[in-house]
Image (cartoon, rainbow, N blue to C red):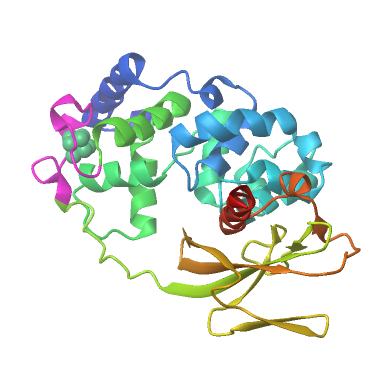
Amino acid sequence: MASNHSNKIIAFHSSLGRWYATHGRRNLPWRTAGDPYPIYISEVMLQQTQVKTVLERFYFPFLECFPTLESLASAEEESVLKAWQGLGYYSRARNLHKAAQLTTPALPDDLEGLLALPGIGKNTANAILAFGFRKPYAVMEANVKRVICRMFALKNPTTQELWEHAEALLNQNDPFDYNQAMMDVGAMICSPKAPMCGECPAYKICKGKNEPSAYPAAKLSKITPVRHKRIIILQDANQRVFLAPRDERFLGGLYGFLEQDELQKQIEWQGKKWALNAKNQIGTLTQTYSHFRLQAKVHLIQLTTAQNGKEWFTRDQINALPLSKADEKATGILLSFYNTL
Ligand code: SF4
C-alpha cells in the first residue's frame, strides 16, 4: 500500500510517473489494447523477443489470424505454429494454443488461475493481471531485473529477493503505468552497457548509480556447444520434397527435412541407400538456438520415382508449412540451387 511506503519511494513513484508521461512508450499497441487477450499474446511474444521485432513483424499478423481467444482455441496447431514462424521457441506457441483451449472464452483474472495454464509463469501472470486487469502485481522482465539490481546494489540476488524488492517498490495505486514505466526505464535509460543515470527517474534513490556495471554481477559466458548435422532433402520425380512433422519436444509440431548426424555419411530410404557427399551437397547453414548452434550440410537426393503421401510437398506448398529457422534456410538453399540450374 502507498501508506506503507517511505517518503522516498512515494517521491520515486512521482518522479517515475512524470518521466513516463513525457518519455514512456505509451503508444505501444498492447498498452492501448485494454483487452487481456492481446496483452497476453504480446507478453508471450516478448518473453524472448525484442519489442521492435514483435511490433514490426509478429504482433499484428498474429492477431489478424487469431483476433480472439476463441479463434486461437479453435485453430489447428499447425496454423498457430505457422503464424509463430520466425519467433522461435515454439513451445511458447503450443502453450498459447493449449492455454486458449483450456480457458476460452476468457482468461482468468486471478494469479492461481493464470499460473495453472501452460506456459504462464509468475512474471507473465503478473503482467496479465497488471496490464489486462489493472491489478496490483509487479512485473519483472529482464530490463526490470537489471533496474532493480542497480537500484538496490544487488550483485547476485536470488529470484525471491528480486521479487521481494519488486513487490515492495510497486506503486499499488497505479500498477499499469508503474510497471510500464519500469520496463521503459530498463529499456531506454538503464541499459546494460551505457546507463544514462543523469536522466533517470530513480537517480535519487538508486544505490548502484556510482558503479552501475557492477550490478548485477556479470555472468561467466557459457560456451555454446555446436551440433554438426546433415539436412537431407529428398525430392521425387515430380519435384516434390519430403517434409515430416517433427515429434520431438524441441521444435515439435513443425515440419522438417530429414536430419542426421554429420558422421553418418549415407542415407537409407525405403530400402535404398545414397552416399552423402560433395556431389549432392547443395549448401551449408548455421542456426543458433538457445542451447546449441547447429552447423549443417544440406544435401539434395533425387529419387527417380514419384512418391505418394501427405508428406510430399510442392515448392509452393512448402511456404504454407510451419518450419524451423534451419529448415527455412535449407528451403532457401534449395530454391537458390534451382535458380542456378
Ligand atoms: S540511476 Fe543509473 S543505475 Fe540507477 S536505475 Fe537509473 S540508470 Fe540505472
Task: Give the side of residue 47 with respect to residue 9, left or right.
Answer: right
**Ligand number 1: quarter of image:** top left
Inspect this view and state whether residue 44 appears. yes
Residue drawn at the location 51% of the way across and 29% of the way down: 56
Residue 30 percent across, percent down from the top left: 55, 26
Residue 117 percent across, percent down from the top left: 68, 51
> Would you place residue 147 above or below residue 244 in this image?
above
Answer whether residue 206 is magenta in the image: yes
Q: Quadrant of residue 22?
A: top left
Residue drawn at the location 70% of the way across and 50% of the way down: 322
Q: Residue furthest top?
A: 22
> Would you place residue 135 above or below residue 301 in this image?
above
Residue drawn at the location 49% of the way across and 67% of the way down: 294
Q: Residue furthest front?
A: 341
Span shown in magenta: 192-213
Answer whether residue 137 is magenta in the image: no
Q: Nearer the viewer, residue 74 or 201?
A: 74
Task: Give the side of residue 219 with respect to residue 225, left or right.
Answer: left
Q: Quadrant of residue 255?
A: bottom right
Q: Nearer the viewer, residue 306 or 246?
A: 306
Task: Give the side of residue 285 with respect to residue 280, left or right.
Answer: left
Inspect this view and state whether residue 37 appears. no
Q: Principal SS element in the magenta part?
A: loop
Q: Quadrant of residue 259?
A: bottom right
Residue 126 percent across, percent down from the top left: 52, 41
